[in-house]
Image (tube, rainbow, N blue to C red):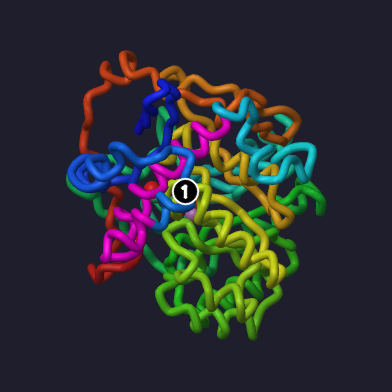
Amino acid sequence: MKVVTDDGVTGVGDATLNGRELAVASYLRDHVVPALIGRDPARIEDTWQYLYKGAYWRRGPVTMSAIAAVDTALWDIKGKVAGLPVYQLLGGRSRAGVTVYGHASAATVDGVLTEVARFVKDGYRAVRIQAGVPGLAGVYGVHIGPGVYEPADAAVPSEAVWSTVRYLNHVPSVFARVREEFGPDLRLVHDVHHRLTPIEAARLGKSLEPYALTWMEDPVPAELQEGFRLIRQHTTTPIAVGEVFNSVWDCQRLVTEQLIDYVRTTVVHAGGITHLRRIFDLAALYHVRSGSHGATDLSPVCLAAALHVDISIPNFGLQEYMPHVADTDAVFPHTYRFEDGFLHPSEEPGLGVDIDEDLAARYPYRPAALPVNRLEDGTLHSW
Ligand code: EZ4
Ligand code: CO
């Protein structure tokens, strides 16, 4: 979204909620925009509180993505008015660059090794590993066939089949091969994508300990925060969680009871820069670091904003990075850049990203839903 001030300064924000985009668009158009007219764009915190407390209905991905879009645009505007990149307004640089991880995935282990080698050659210091599971036609995060991996692949959700037994039996052998080939220093992460129970996740974590992962991600669905205590009691494999969280209350217990190591909330789904910083500040007190979500369904506007947060906070961990396709990059001209395993935020005033609306108009909205997942007996399971 774009916010334009009476002085003609424009700010951009991301409001993308994958598979539920129009719900946020309506929330903004029908409920938020009318209330923004005439407000002072300099009052970022007050506007955040106005949209959060003022809605009466708090939290939730739709509300918080809408608030995020406005908040991000107001930070962009404040940077442009001040003549400073947003990270300078957040306290300035805490590190030389933002360490990112790329996605290495393939149906076979040999294919995964080829992919990892490509990332290492390109300078990446951290890589996410997702491999096909023998006996399953396809699994989350594994790219099969031509084109780029985008899981929202059909107007009505496609259906996948899942087996926890086959998965748990296979994954450790994949990491054994990766460590054998690439040694101990390359940082490795793995996304479980909400598919296990706490005791299954504990088994996975224990079986991966020899391969020293930086994290296992979303080992269980996280509505039951105390469930993580069970995982924690059994394994030293670090835990990352939070890409579907939208407020500090979703991870308050996980953080304050030190049940996780990385919180993966990002700008667009967690109420913008203002609220994301609040989450990371709480996390910092409990030795929890950031590990922001950075899939391609989050636009370059979100990534640009995330980088300003990443470079400035004391407890940055790792940033996910899936480069967007050229068509997307063209619609969102930006000046963040990848070099030597790091992303560098823009040095331009504001966020350093824009939306080319004429170009965007060439890509009409097409509904695309995320898949659903079923066990081999047909039971609906978390995707
Ligand atoms: O499945 O962003 O870590 N990354 C992920 C993503 C999510 C998508 C859902 O829209 O888990 O690939
Ligand atoms: Co994930």
Relative depth, front residue between 351 and 131: 351
**Left or right: 196 in relation to 127:** left
Indicate the position of residue 166 as horizontal and vertical percent values.
Answer: 46, 66
Q: Is residue 116 visible?
A: yes
Is residue 285 highlighted in magenta?
Answer: no
> Measuring 59% from the left and 50% from the top, which residue is drawn there?
129
**Disc 1 residue type?**
Gly
Q: Secondary structure at mark 1?
A: helix
Whether the residue under disc 1 has CB within 8 Å of ligand 1 = no
Decide: is 93 above or below 254.
above
> Measuring 39% from the left and 42% from the top, which residue is drawn there?
69
Q: Point out the image quarter for the C terminus.
A: bottom left
Decide: is 105 above or below 332.
below
**Left or right: 282 in relation to 145:** right
Q: Is residue 140 visible?
A: no
Indicate the position of residue 108 as horizontal and vertical percent values.
Answer: 54, 46
Characterize the local packing of mark 1: few (<14), some (14-19) or many (20 or more) Cα atoms within 10 angstroms: many
Indicate the position of residue 354 as horizontal and vertical percent values.
Answer: 46, 23
Decide: is 306 above or below 137.
above
**Left or right: 178 in relation to 27:** right
> Measuring 64% from the left and 85% from the top, which residue is drawn there?
233
Decide: is 291 above or below 25.
below
Indicate the position of residue 369 as horizontal and vertical percent values.
Answer: 25, 46
Relative depth, front residue between 242 and 187: 242
Residues in magenta, as a range:
50-79
Relative depth, front residue between 142 and 57: 57
Q: Point out the image quarter for the N terminus.
A: top left
| Numbered circles on residues, count | 1
Q: On the image, numbered disc 1 is attached to which residue? A: 272
**Left or right: 201 in relation to 268:** right
Residue 213 position by quadrant:
bottom right
Q: Main secondary structure of the magenta part?
A: helix
